[in-house]
Amino acid sequence: MERLIQRYPDRTRMNHWLVAMLFVCAALSGFAFFHPAFYFFTALFGGGAWTRILHPFIGVFMMLCFVGMFVQVWRDNVWRDGDGEWVRRSGTLLRGDEDGMPAVGKYNGGQKAIFWLFTLCLVVLLVTGFTFWQPWFADAFPITVRRIGVLLHAVAAFILVLGAIVHIYAAIWVKGSIRAMTRGYVSAAWARRHHLLWYREVTGDK
Ligand code: HEM
């Protein structure tokens, strides 16, 4: 029988998938305003006016859900000695040689970097979003602040989408990871192979 180890409790998984679904909605509705070529995405949200009304609310809701997730996982994402070394040697991993990589805890340097990138981008999106949120908040900001806000909002959204693509690609690429977020469990073999220090910590095995 395959031995399973719990990686996520239900509350973290539900939070994660809420963030993921809201992220897709925020990204599609945001793309609709980004360039006329994407305007057709407004059809998914009830037309142009509704998309414009809903987008900021979807964004704020996503941020609130992410805060819940942040609280649950930030400690395991604190940068530690050895994470930089893991990132420097990640070329070895990409060439398919995981045995040559340093042992890692619950998350590797790449996952941690993506986690902090997500956090930074979401904070920038939230703060800048308020500077041009008509009709309630935008009037409180000078036009220059609003213009810079629009620009930074688009840059942060672009980086977040790239980060999410890397995150999803890695989740699919490392076989057995998706199950961590859908069922909450990973196999002991998965944990030993990809997160040896975490495996030792939770099982007590040497
Ligand atoms: C369809 C899209 C997504 C898929 C398939 C996916 C998949 C996964 C999987 C499999 C894990 C577990 C990795 C592990 O335990 O080693 C994970 C963790 C996580 N995901 Fe996602 N994810 C998606 C979207 C997102 C989005 C949009 C965000 C945030 C903007 C996000 C934030 C996180 C965070 C914070 C973790 C915890 C890992 C860490 O803190 O480094 N995910 N995801």
Image (spheres, rainbow, N blue to C red):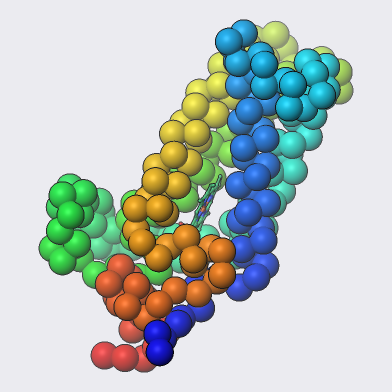
The picture places residue 95, in percent across and down from the top left corner, at 15, 49
Q: Quadrant of the C terminus?
A: bottom left
Answer above or below: position of 138 versus 74.
above
The percent coordinates of residue 70 (x first, y second) are 59, 56
Residue 72, quarter of picture: bottom right
Query: Where 153 sits versus 184, above or below?
Result: above
Question: Residue drawn 31% across and 91% down?
Answer: 205
Relative to 202, 61 lies left or right: right
* Residue 195 placement: quadrant: bottom left
The answer to whether residue 132 of the structure is visible from this angle is yes
Which residue occupies the foreground of this view, 75 or 16?
16
Q: Can you give x and y, in whole percent of width and height, for residue 36 in the image?
A: 62, 8
Looking at this rendering, what residue extends furthest in the front direction?
1
**Left or right of 101 on screen, residue 71:** right
Q: Is residue 134 visible?
A: no
Name above or below for residue 206 compared with residue 22: below
Residue at screen point 60% across, 16% down: 38
The quadrant where residue 32 appears: top right
Depth check: give the residue in front, 187 or 103: 187
Nearer to the camera, 19 or 79: 19
Q: Tell me residue 61's x, y (percent).
A: 74, 43
Determine the residue located farthest toward the right in the rendered image: 136
What residue sits 68% from the left and 51% below the top?
18
Name the residue at 61% across, 73% down: 9
Q: Quadrant of the N terminus?
A: bottom left
